Image: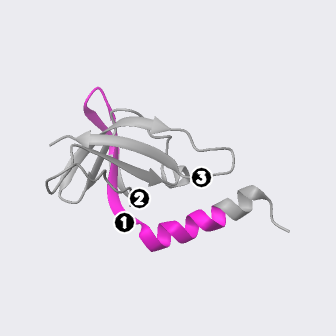
Amino acid sequence: MCDWYTLNAAVNAIMQRTFGEPVAYQSAQAGVPVGDPITITAIRHARVREESGVMANVEEISVNPADLPTFPQRGDWVTAWGSQFVVTTVRQPDPYGSPTRMGWSNFR
């Protein structure tokens, strides 16, 4: 029998393979890039229906924190879907290993 952490990790792996998309993640400090960007898999969350336009001002993604060299921080950059975003919020993963969720806003 599996424990909750193992089951949740297996479900997360399936979700990443099914719904995940590649994005470029760049650590940054005070608006200056730190190190080289890396490509990770992120799940883009649906926007609320009232938002309009091709690209919303605020997006939210889920990532596997193990894919990143350091835990994501506010101010880091994500490049995806033809735009660059700055991370505005980071939600800690739950104790069962759910992916980390990040809010981000259109940067450039």
The residue located at (19%, 40%) in the rendering is: 107
Q: Is residue 17 magenta?
A: yes
- From the image, tell me which residue sits under label 2: 42
Q: In the picture provided, is 106 more to the left or to the right than 44?
A: left
- Which badge, 3 or 1, is on the more N-terminal residue? 1
Q: Position of residue 21 (x, y in %)?
A: 36, 66
- From the image, tell me which residue sits under label 1: 21
Magenta stretch, residue numbers: 9-35
Q: Residues within 10 Å of mark 2 (few under 14, many from 20)?
A: many
* SS for dot 3: loop
* SS for dot 1: strand
Q: Position of residue 14 (x, y in %)?
A: 55, 71
Query: In the rendered view, how is the structure colored?
Result: one colour
The residue located at (73%, 62%) in the rendering is: 6
Q: Residues within 10 Å of mark 3 (few under 14, many from 20)?
A: some
Q: Are marks 2 and 1 in contact (CB under 8 Å)?
A: yes
Q: In the picture provided, is 55 more to the left or to the right than 7?
A: left
- From the image, tell me which residue sits under label 3: 98
| Quarter of the figure with the N terminus | bottom right
Residue type of the residue flagged with mark 2: Ala
